[in-house]
Amino acid sequence: MLIVGCGDVGLRTAGSLGAPQSQRVRLLALTSSPERVRLLRACGLTPLLGDLDTPATLARLAGLAHRVVHLAPPDAQRRKDGESDLRTRNLTRALRKRSLPRSLVYASTTGVYGDCHGERVNESRTVRPHTPRAMRRVDAEAWVRLLGRAGVPCSILRVPGIYAQDREGGTPRERLLKRTPVLQAQDDVYTNHIHANDLARACILALWRGKPQRTFNVCDDTDLKMGDYFDLAADLMGLQRPPRVARSEANQSLPLMLLSFMNESRRLDNTRMKRELRLTLKYPHVRQGLALQKPLL
């Protein structure tokens, strides 16, 4: 099994392989950072040096792995490429040059749906990305589907906000400490979440159980607006609830990246994930995932 983009979720994915699978599967990890080689080896993975931005370094990937988990994000710095994800293009082209993998899982984003005005969203909904970041993900999904048409069973996981207590930046604590405002109730938007460990398990299950060329919303059962989510997190962590502001005030004072999340509202339907991948969530609600977070002394 080859993990491409083996950061936090990639390491969790490798670690979520249970016996007897863990005894039968050789774990490989593509990395462009020589500094990560020692860490990957310590975690039981065989590191492969290669750069998704440099196709010539990916030649050794052809025919190397039976199953591939693609977690690498598009390169947001390549402004000249705008809405394209050259990394996924380079990876899928490299994988096609010899014997094809038996399955591939790609972690996309639920941002591809755009603003759904708080409606319930399943995988059949037409994508309408509103940001360059989401447009690059739509392009990546197209390259994955092209690989699927070449004969590789591919699963696309559309992933919302990833959280975990032991993940860097994986809880709202820092934002709550900064007293970053959230929208007042009448302007607020729905938000969606998945615990990093449940996402890792979804990646493994999709490799073996995913139907060919299938898309999955990978999220928990939480049904909260963004402000209510931060209120809940503050209560669980023993911190002050964030201030509430009108959208007009937020538009003038908050960073553009944060505003982009406040401009989209949707409630994801995870029925297909549960039915087809047979994933039982360990953290079905953010309350359970954040409850173990110790409050500040």
Image (tube, grey):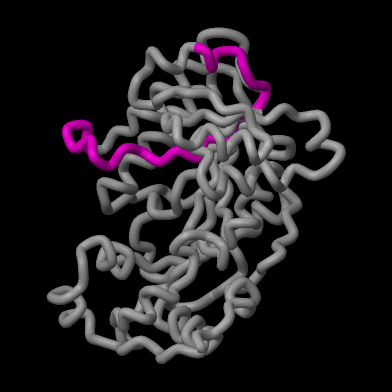
Quadrant where the N terminus sits is top right
Whole-percent x and y of residue 243?
A: 31, 89
Residue at image position (35%, 86%) is: 242
- Front residue of 147/33: it is 33
- Front residue of 195/48: it is 48
What number of labels is visible?
0
Whole-percent x and y of residue 8?
A: 53, 49
Q: With respect to residue 38, does 257 lie above or below?
A: below
Q: Residue furthest top?
A: 98
Whole-percent x and y of residue 108?
A: 46, 45
Evaluate whether residue 52 shows in this view.
yes
Q: Residue furthest right?
A: 20
Q: Left of 251 or right of it: where is 152?
A: right
Q: Left of 296 or right of it: where is 174?
A: left
Q: Left of 54 or right of it: where is 94?
A: right
Evaluate whether residue 269 shows in this view.
no
Residue at image position (43%, 66%) is: 266
Residue 68 is covered by the magenta coloring: yes
Residue at image position (64%, 77%) is: 292
Q: With respect to residue 294, does 266 lie above or below?
A: above
Residue 115 is covered by the magenta coloring: no
Q: Which residues are magenta?
A: 60-82
